[in-house]
Amino acid sequence: RRPPRSTLFPYTTLFRSERKPLPSIYQVTLGRALVDAGADVVWGNHPHVLQGAEFYRGKPIMYSMGNLISNLPCRNGLFRMTVPDSGKAKMEFLPGEVHGGRVTLLTGSAKRAAQVEMHRLCLLLLQQFWR
């Protein structure tokens, strides 16, 4: 049974497509099916790289945000999500990186460059899977 409307229903899943800059058709199909089944937010993980995000039927799907915990250096990110009274989610990408097992959020020009890269990945995702 679905929780009351005022409750946000997030879902996280393990995607197995490692180190690829775009999600696989399986990931996209599963992410969208989870929204169709009632998820308000889908957070995918495991590919170890950023893969972009999309809104499907007004619900955000983040395919991979990189590694949040790792002993290897890498880029990653978080999304800050706000849901105003209108119910339409707004997302802000907060890029980070891992060094020495610690996550640091990027600032300044590095932050902007990472946001541009995430935007590029999101556009590639749309070109690949929205025909």
Image: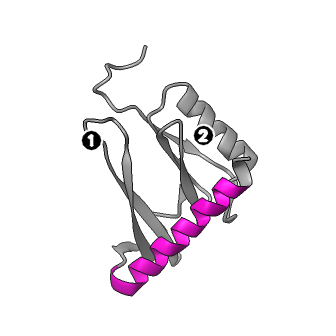
Question: Residue 92 versus residue 63: which sits nearer the camera?
Answer: 92
Q: Position of residue 107 (x, y in %)?
A: 33, 80
Query: For residue 29: magenta?
Result: no
Q: Position of residue 26 (x, y in %)?
A: 73, 43
First reached walking from the N terminus: tag 2 or tag 1: 2
Classify mark 1: residues with Cα within 10 Å, few (<14), some (14-19) or many (20+). Answer: few
Q: Which label was assigned to residue 101?
A: none
Q: Main secondary structure of the magenta part?
A: helix
In the rendered structure, the answer to whether residue 94 lies left or right of residue 29 reads: left
Q: Which residue range is magenta in the image?
A: 107-127
Question: Looking at the picture, does residue 24 appear above or below residue 118?
Answer: above
Q: Which residue is mark 1?
A: 84
Classify mark 2: residues with Cα within 10 Å, few (<14), some (14-19) or many (20+). Answer: many
In the rendered structure, the answer to whether residue 89 lies left or right of residue 27 reads: left
Residue drawn at point x = 30 percent, y = 42 percent: 83
Front: mark 2 or 1: 1
Q: Is residue 71 visible?
A: no
How far apart are the two marked residues, 2 and 1, measured between alpha carbons? 23 Å
Query: For residue 112: magenta?
Result: yes
Residue drawn at point x = 70 percent, y = 64 percent: 20
Residue 123 sits in quarter: bottom right
Question: Looking at the picture, does residue 121 appear above or below residue 44?
Answer: below
Q: Residue furthest left?
A: 85
Q: Position of residue 17 (x, y in %)?
A: 70, 55
Residue drawn at point x = 30 percent, y = 28 percent: 7
Tell me the kind of residue under disc 1.
Pro
Q: Which residue is mark 2?
A: 31
Tell me the kind of residue under disc 2.
Gly
Question: Looking at the picture, does residue 18 appear above or below residue 97?
Answer: above
SS state under label 2: helix
State the quadrant of the N terminus.
Answer: top left
Residue drawn at point x = 25 percent, y = 36 percent: 85
